[in-house]
Amino acid sequence: MQSWACDTRDALRRKMANSAKPASRTTLRGCVFLCVVWLTVGAAKGQTPQKLDCKKAGPCTCNSANGVIDLTPLANSDNTPRFKDVPGGGDSFSWNPCNPFDEGSGCAKVSACQNHEGSAQYAIGTQDSAEFILDQTRGLELHYKATTDVTRESFVQLICDMGTEGSLTAKGEDPAGSAQYYMTLTSKYACPGVSGGGISAGSVLLIVFFSLVVVYILAGMAVMKFGKGAAGRELIPNYSFWKGLPFLIRDGIMFVVGGCKPKKGYDSI
């Protein structure tokens, strides 16, 4: 009787241990999936202010430690603004990097123009006044000035986004009565090293990453062939892992969708 009880208890423990293994594997697969997502998201540039100093090289180009920022591909050269009548704060704004443009009766040879309530235009920046500044909150900006009846200033925040050709939004005057106007450019050309001939830190990281991948594959295949006598697909280093990776990702997705909770249960004895 005692022997039967011990055998039953041991069997139950083994069953419980085995039932926990799938949960552990699911947890591991969930972690692998989350790591893949984190690396993917981390590789992309977020739409956040750029905290970098950039020395002016021209009205729309500057040099930074991460590479050259060159907005030339966004510039119109036919005396019209690339971004026209963008609404913001009750007014609308036009802006063109690099080259001046004319608009209405109040904006001649400007870089930025305010269309006030649809009835009057005011120059809020000229190309020769352009300077790259680093704001503690908004990050890297293009700053312009223009003086007519009063001195007006415009600030164009430069947001790096490799997935966007060029998009401009306007906040308008802030605070009211300050004659300071704010806009935001989101563009891949606001990223260091994209069009100015320099190389960005992200590009360096990608080059290093893919170089290491090539070295890993070639060195791994050499070890597998000459060290272990492998042939065919077994030459691929860690072949079983790469073969199972799609299933790890699948299980990881299911794990995350399921609230990151491992399945619980007991097998029948």
Image: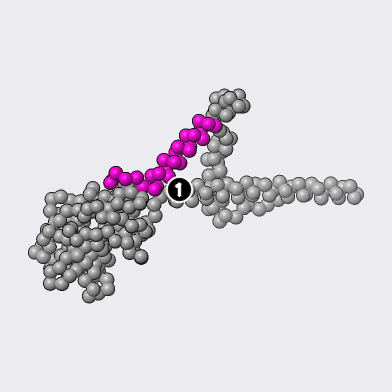
Residue at the image point whose x is 60% and y is 55% from the top = 261
Return the residue nearer the eye: 213 or 241.
213
Return the residue nearer the eye: 147 or 21.
147
Q: Is residue 166 magenta?
A: no
Left of 215 or right of it: where is 188? Answer: left
Return the residue nearer the eye: 129 or 22.
129
- Quarter occupied by residue 112: bottom left
Measured from the top left, where is residue 208 in percent x and y? 44, 41
Residue at the image point whose x is 39% and y is 55% from the top = 46
Overall secondary structure of the magenta section: helix
Q: Amino acid at mark 1?
A: Thr
Residue position for label 1: 40
Measured from the top left, where is residue 151 in percent x and y? 17, 70
Q: Which residue reaches farthest right?
A: 1
When the figure is inspected, residue 169 is found, relative to residue 219, above or below; the finding is below
Left of 95 or right of it: where is 37? Answer: right
Any part of residue 269 in sight: no
Magenta region, residue range:
195-220
